[in-house]
Image (cartoon, rainbow, N blue to C red):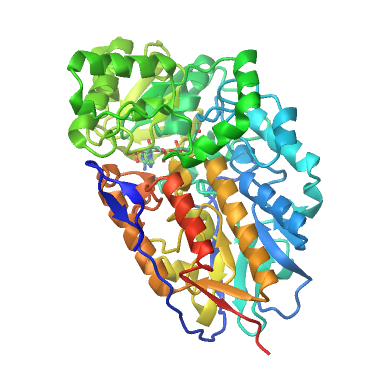
């Protein structure tokens, strides 16, 4: 058993289990399968049939168009860096990307006000010192257009686009046991084979519109924040409804409100949000970062969330109330996610969390002038931070505008969407446009949308029917040579994604180099290692307050999705150390096999 692990209150730790056991390989063949697609028509913004399902034939390795060492699915931060590393190692690689350009999340999420709520200097690649010297971020938090420009700059600078097939969706990936290769088919009819299949599909890329009755009858325009039209949307003179109050809606609502004739915000669950306090980056901050980048990058890697937050070491409950209040106020004034790190136990101890939650509640009451509206905006039924803490610019203030109304769906639920707008249990709202800020089938949706068939004809969908199962969030037992960058079971969405992406990409690239060097053709986790890892992921989550919330972290936002806490909350520092130790022990917990003779 390992000696390091996730720190519990009181200094004890949850040990990370270790495994080296082997598994047997079975044979089997793929079968016909189905592939589900998104809900809003990307060109017209109008709803498509709610459960349109295509079917396509399963494929085998024979008759493929081309062979590669690796196929990478997705050209966001993860896919781009993966391609770069594979190129450096001399692996032939093809990348498939559903969008018409690079960027992934930052290609699709173009809603008004979209920006990252991690500091731009930290939310950027660290692998190239030259790149860091060349690129200038302009604001504390980079806007979506600036991040997309950055990713295009990266793709051009490292000449990555020539290996990326855009506007191409991967439909299936089937492991051919005899050949020991993946067969990958796309919606453009391409079929290629590869020794390694690497999913860089993102954690929040399967946009989701709830199955509202009557949605196809609506005569106005509909938009999803995660599939926003590239040419933008002008809401001037319109009655607009935004459904949802998660991070995306909270960023877009203040911007839509200044355009719309009237904005109705349909809120089911109020969210905690803290001010961003965005602004131009000072030349001093940039200079300091550039002078000390290596030190800052290394520090971030060892922190729980890969963020350079100042982590308070005391319990919130040790403090005198007045001092505690001053500490929260200082974080509130600084802006951003740092509020959650004010004390050491805010995500571990409900009583401690209550002090922070009450602080934010009092802020909401002080900002929102109408006390009835303020009370509706106050979150009550989950601890602060256990649904993703939102970061806003003027969100609560927006409810002081005369052209903004809050519709409390807990009191008056949506009954249906009509031709003219939204009908709740007590009113009809006439709308020109509906914006769905209703989130994503997070962490597993994009992977489940691909027909992935591993050994013995086992499908990933079946394997994950009770929740995702992985080893380290990187690989899945039964699916040899398939890698999932920031997959479920890794810190991913509970960290600065770019840091976690770089860590996974480097781990995978080093792994492929190791396999080549040792003439190993196949790698796959043992079932025992996977089981122990998932038990550990759950055990650690259960030490925190996270499971108390109905969040997308647990799949609770999707009716029928198994309720499992999907990311690893043990901390990126601990996790990185674990990944490195596994490698040092010659890939403990993985089964490595030589080519068949
Ligand atoms: O999605 P969400 P999001 N009827 O799932 C509501 C990242 N991100 O796109 O809470 C009515 O958080 C749902 O209500 P409820 C970030 O990690 C980052 O906003 O389920 N309402 C909720 O209010 C974030 O967490 C950034 O009751 C329904 C909303 O829709 C993640 O992406 C910016 C409903 C969905 O909120 C996802 O954020 C944006 C229904 N049937 C996003 N179904 C930055 O870095 C759902 N809702 C700044």
x 61%, y 34%: residue: 294
x 51%, y 56%: residue: 580
In the image, residue 394 above or below residue 506:
above
Residue 282 locus on image (x, y percent): 61, 14
Is 157 placed left or right of 421 in the picture?
right
Where in the image, quadrant-wise, is ligand 1 located? top left
Q: Which corner quadrant of the image does residue 138 belong to?
A: top right
Is 479 placed left or right of 21 in the picture?
right
> Which residue is nearer to you in this view: 126 or 392?
126
In the image, residue 423 above or below residue 185:
above
Residue 229 locus on image (x, y percent): 63, 35
In the image, residue 39 above or below residue 36:
above
Q: Quadrant of the N terminus?
A: bottom left
Residue 295 locus on image (x, y percent): 57, 32
Is residue 128 among the parts visible in the rendering? yes
Is residue 479 among the parts visible in the rendering? no
In the image, residue 523 above or below residue 72:
below
Q: Residue furthest bottom?
A: 597
Q: Quadrant of the C terminus?
A: bottom right
Residue 506 locus on image (x, y percent): 61, 53
Q: Which corner quadrant of the image does residue 375 belong to?
A: top left
Is 325 placed left or right of 142 in the picture?
left
Is 555 placed left or right of 426 in the picture?
right
Task: Count all numbered tags in the image, as a single digit.
Answer: 0
Q: Which corner quadrant of the image does residue 592 belong to?
A: bottom right
């Amino acid at each position: 058993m390992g000696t390091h692990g996730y720190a519990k209150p009181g200094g004890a730790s949850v040990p990370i289990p270790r495994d080296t056991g082997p598994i047997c390989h079975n044979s089997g063949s793929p079968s016909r399968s189905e592939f589900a697609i998104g809900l809003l028509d990307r060109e017209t913004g109008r709803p498509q049939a709610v459960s349109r399902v295509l079917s396509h034939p399963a494929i085998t390795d024979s008759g493929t168009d081309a062979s590669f060492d690796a196929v990478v699915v997705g050209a966001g931060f993860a896919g781009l860096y993966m391609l770069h590393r594979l190129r450096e190692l001399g692996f032939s690689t093809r990348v498939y990307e559903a969008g018409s350009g690079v960027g992934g999340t930052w290609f699709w999420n173009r809603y008004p006000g979209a920006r990252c709520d991690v500091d731009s200097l930290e939310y950027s690649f660290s692998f190239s010192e030259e790149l860091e010297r060349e690129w200038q971020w302009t604001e504390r938090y980079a806007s979506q257009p600036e991040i997309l420009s950055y990713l295009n700059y990266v793709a051009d600078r490292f000449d990555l686009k020539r290996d990326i097939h855009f506007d191409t969706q991967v439909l299936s990936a089937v492991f051919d046991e005899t050949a020991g290769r993946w067969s990958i088919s796309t919606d453009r009819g391409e079929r290629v084979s590869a020794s390694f299949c690497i999913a860089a599909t993102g954690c929040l890329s399967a946009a989701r519109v709830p199955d509202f009755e009557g949605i196809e009858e609506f005569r106005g325009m509909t938009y999803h924040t995660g599939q926003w039209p590239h040419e933008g949307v002008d809401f001037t003179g319109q009655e607009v409804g935004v459904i949802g109050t998660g991070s995306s809606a909270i960023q877009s609502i203040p911007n839509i409100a200044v355009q719309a004739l009237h904005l109705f915000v349909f809120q089911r669950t109020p969210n905690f949000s803290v001010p961003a306090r965005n602004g131009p980056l000072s030349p001093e901050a940039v200079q300091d970062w550039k002078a000390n980048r290596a030190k800052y990058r290394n520090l971030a890697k060892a922190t729980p969330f890969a963020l350079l937050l100042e982590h308070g070491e005391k319990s919130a409950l040790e403090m005198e109330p007045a001092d505690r209040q001053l500490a929260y106020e200082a974080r509130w004034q600084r802006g951003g996610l740092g509020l959650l790190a004010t004390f050491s136990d805010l995500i571990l101890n409900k009583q401690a969390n209550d002090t922070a939650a009450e602080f934010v509640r009092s802020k909401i009451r002080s900002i929102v002038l109408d006390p009835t509206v303020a009370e509706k905006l106050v979150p009550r039924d989950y601890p602060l931070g256990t649904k993703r803490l939102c970061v806003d610019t003027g969100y609560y203030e927006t409810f002081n505008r005369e052209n903004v109304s809050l519709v409390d769906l807990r009191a008056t639920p949506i009954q249906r969407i009509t031709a003219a707008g939204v009908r709740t249990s007590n009113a009809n709202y006439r709308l020109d446009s509906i914006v769905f800020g209703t989130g994503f089938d997070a962490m597993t949706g994009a992977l489940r949308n691909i027909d992935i068939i591993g050994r013995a004809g086992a499908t990933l969908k079946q394997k994950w029917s009770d929740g995702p199962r992985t080893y380290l969030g990187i690989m899945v037992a039964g699916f040899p040579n398939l890698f999932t960058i920031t997959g479920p079971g890794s810190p991913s969405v509970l960290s600065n994604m770019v840091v976690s992406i770089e860590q996974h990409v480097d781990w995978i690239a080093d792994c492929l180099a190791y396999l080549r060097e040792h003439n190993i053709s196949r790698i796959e986790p043992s079932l025992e290692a996977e089981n122990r890892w998932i038990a550990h992921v759950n055990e650690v989550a259960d030490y925190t307050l996270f499971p108390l919330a109905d969040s997308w972290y647990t799949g609770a936002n999707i009716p029928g999705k198994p309720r499992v806490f999907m990311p690893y909350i043990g901390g990126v520092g601990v996790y990185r150390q674990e990944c490195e130790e596994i490698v040092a022990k010659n890939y403990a917990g993985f089964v490595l096999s030589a080519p068949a003779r």
